[in-house]
Image (cartoon, rainbow, N blue to C red):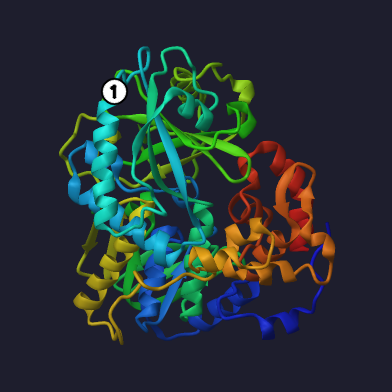
């Protein structure tokens, strides 16, 4: 492939206000470091931090976001990619949390990002030899979850009602299921993100559209009463910014800025296999974990021809590492549990990739001896009284509620000059549109699924070189224009930004190796 060829100065003049680039980042950092006071400074470029930046900027506040690495470089690119209705929380008896999940799922699927969320069917098998011999619990749970779906007003056309299916139908949806003892399955639907990192990028770009400065590669060293000292990891040197309020959205690393925060981080690991290894499944597969109450592993078919298998829930003891990776024990555990429901057990040879992330679970002291699976997924917003507000806990599905709660507290506690109330429940992200309008967008379907109504703009980057509408390497389902757009509009500054988070090539080891030359060319 080759790179887009157009003049950098012309691109700068013509770029939409939502476009992020290395040049824009450098200009905005220089402007802010020169002086002045921001209304809100956000620390952390994950889904919650980007959500806070958008919420605050959309209220008319001056905002900057500082991220030490890249957008979604931590937990927010290591999720199961689900926008779920809280079925697990219902099983644990936490109806308010399940309702919050169902309500936020509706907002994401119907108004905020319908282009990034699709409906995915799931099957939970039952019968002799399966952990669930009758499927009664799954039936009751999914019907209770459907009541919340109905209360949230998510239409049945998007998320149909759950029902039981026979063994033949279950095997059609999940061909790798073992037939021995399979009596049937409970089928239900939930939301699935095409890509969690793309949601974060869309949030950051929409915040930039509303005036927020998005500054990656900036490590915050100290926060002192609204004064933030940070290091520019791209240009070098320290700088200082001032803000009326600092919002700490650093996830599992939030305690580095606010030592009063008590977290019990949990590591979640996923494996990646090729879809044909599991017979090209058309539905997600829930597999009950033997010996554990209401715990399931999931096998999630992805639009890119892979299946994600997850996930573990293991406490992270000691200092929180900057990165975590799947361990040998993680691989054995995930393959072993999933294989209990398969005709052919999976082996390590079937695994083509994997990833791991850490959940910032709040330590409420209620389960001091238990594992992190017992901890609540509720979020907490706290104010240290010295212009530092911290938001932690929660989950990807409820990022918007977390962000709104943090900004509400900031506006109230520090009398910020917001010119309107929060409206992110009605504010579409860049590229968003109803499903019928998305179906009419004239661009390659892969681009529409990833960029929504912006897909024609992305495709237009190939006007200078038609080869950019071709895959970047043999066997890699990524088009050249995606790399070009990542550089010119989505703030990518190095190869890993492009391959780990803008295109997710790095989730498959062979794709990552094959795509590196194209990524280097795009950056060049």
Residue appearing at x 58%, y 73% in the figure: 25
Q: In which quarter of the image is residue 20?
A: bottom right
Indicate left or right for 519 with 434 as reference. Answer: right
Q: Tell me if mark 1 has few (under 14), some (14-19) or many (20+) residues whose alpha carbon lies within 10 angstroms of its own.
A: few
Quarter of the image with the C terminus in it: bottom right
Q: Nearer the viewer, residue 410 or 6?
A: 6
Q: In which quarter of the image is residue 463?
A: bottom right
The answer to whether one can see residue 320 in this image is no
**Is residue 352 positioned above or below 158 on the image?**
above
- In this view, the residue farthest toward the left is 366
Residue 183 is situated, as x and y percent measured from the top left of the image, at 38, 19
Residue 334 is situated, as x and y percent measured from the top left of the image, at 47, 25
Indicate left or right for 391 with 269 as reference. Answer: left
Residue appearing at x 77%, y 51% in the figure: 471
Residue 159 is situated, as x and y percent measured from the top left of the image, at 39, 50
Residue 520 is situated, as x and y percent measured from the top left of the image, at 76, 56
Residue appearing at x 30%, y 25% in the figure: 135
Number of numbered labels in the structure image:
1
Residue appearing at x 26%, y 40% in the figure: 143
SS at mark 1? loop
Q: Nearer the viewer, residue 206 or 307?
A: 307
The answer to whether one can see residue 153 in this image is yes
Quarter of the image with the N terminus in it: bottom right
Q: Mark 1 points at which residue?
A: 292
């Amino acid at each position: 492939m080759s790179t887009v060829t157009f003049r950098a100065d012309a691109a700068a003049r013509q770029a939409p206000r939502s476009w992020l680039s290395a040049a824009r980042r450098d200009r905005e950092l220089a402007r802010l470091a020169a002086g002045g006071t921001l209304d809100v400074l956000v620390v952390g470029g994950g889904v919650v931090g980007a959500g806070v930046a958008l919420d605050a900027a959309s209220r008319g506040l001056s905002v900057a976001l500082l991220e030490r690495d890249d957008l979604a470089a931590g937990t927010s690119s290591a999720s199961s990619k689900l926008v779920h209705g809280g079925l697990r929380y219902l099983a644990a008896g936490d109806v308010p949390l399940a309702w919050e999940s169902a309500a936020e799922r509706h907002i994401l699927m119907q108004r905020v990002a319908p282009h990034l969320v699709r409906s995915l069917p799931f099957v939970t098998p039952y019968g002799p030899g399966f952990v669930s011999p009758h499927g009664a619990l799954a039936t009751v749970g999914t019907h209770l979850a459907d009541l919340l779906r109905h209360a949230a007003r998510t239409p049945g056309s998007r998320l149909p009602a759950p029902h039981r299916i026979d063994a033949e139908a279950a095997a059609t949806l999940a061909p790798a299921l073992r037939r021995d003892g399979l009596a049937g399955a409970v089928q239900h639907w939930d939301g699935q993100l095409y890509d969690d990192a793309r949601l974060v990028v869309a949030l950051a770009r929409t915040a930039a559209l509303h005036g927020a400065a998005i500054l990656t590669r900036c490590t915050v060293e100290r926060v002192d009463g609204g004064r933030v000292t940070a290091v520019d990891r791209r240009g070098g040197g320290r700088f200082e910014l001032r803000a009326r309020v600092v919002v700490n959205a650093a996830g599992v690393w939030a305690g580095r800025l606010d030592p009063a925060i008590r977290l019990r981080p949990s590591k979640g690991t996923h494996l990646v296999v090729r879809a044909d290894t599991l017979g090209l499944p058309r539905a997600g597969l829930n597999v009950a974990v033997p010996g554990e109450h209401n715990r399931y592993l999931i096998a999630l078919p992805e639009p890119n021809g892979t299946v994600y298998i997850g996930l573990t829930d293991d406490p992270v003891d000691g200092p929180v590492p900057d990165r975590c990776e799947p361990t040998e024990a993680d691989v054995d555990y995930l393959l072993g549990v999933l294989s209990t429901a398969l005709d052919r057990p999976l082996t390590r040879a079937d695994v083509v990739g994997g990833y791991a992330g850490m959940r910032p679970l709040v330590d409420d002291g209620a389960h001091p001896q238990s594992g992190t699976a017992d901890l609540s997924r509720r979020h907490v917003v706290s104010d240290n009284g010295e212009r530092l507000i911290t938001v932690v806990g929660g989950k990807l599905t409820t990022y918007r509620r977390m962000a709104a709660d943090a900004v509400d507290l900031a506006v109230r506690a520090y009398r910020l000059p917001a010119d309107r109330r929060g409206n992110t429940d009605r504010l579409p992200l860049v590229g968003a549109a109803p499903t019928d309008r998305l179906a009419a967008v004239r661009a390659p379907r892969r681009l529409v699924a990833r960029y929504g109504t912006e897909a024609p703009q992305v495709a237009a980057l190939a006007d200078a070189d038609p080869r950019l509408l071709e895959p970047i390497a043999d066997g890699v389902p990524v088009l050249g224009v995606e790399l070009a757009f990542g550089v010119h509009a989505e703030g990518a500054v190095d190869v890993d930004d492009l391959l780990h988070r803008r295109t997710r090539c790095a989730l498959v080891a062979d794709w990552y190796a094959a795509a590196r030359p194209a990524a280097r060319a795009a950056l060049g």
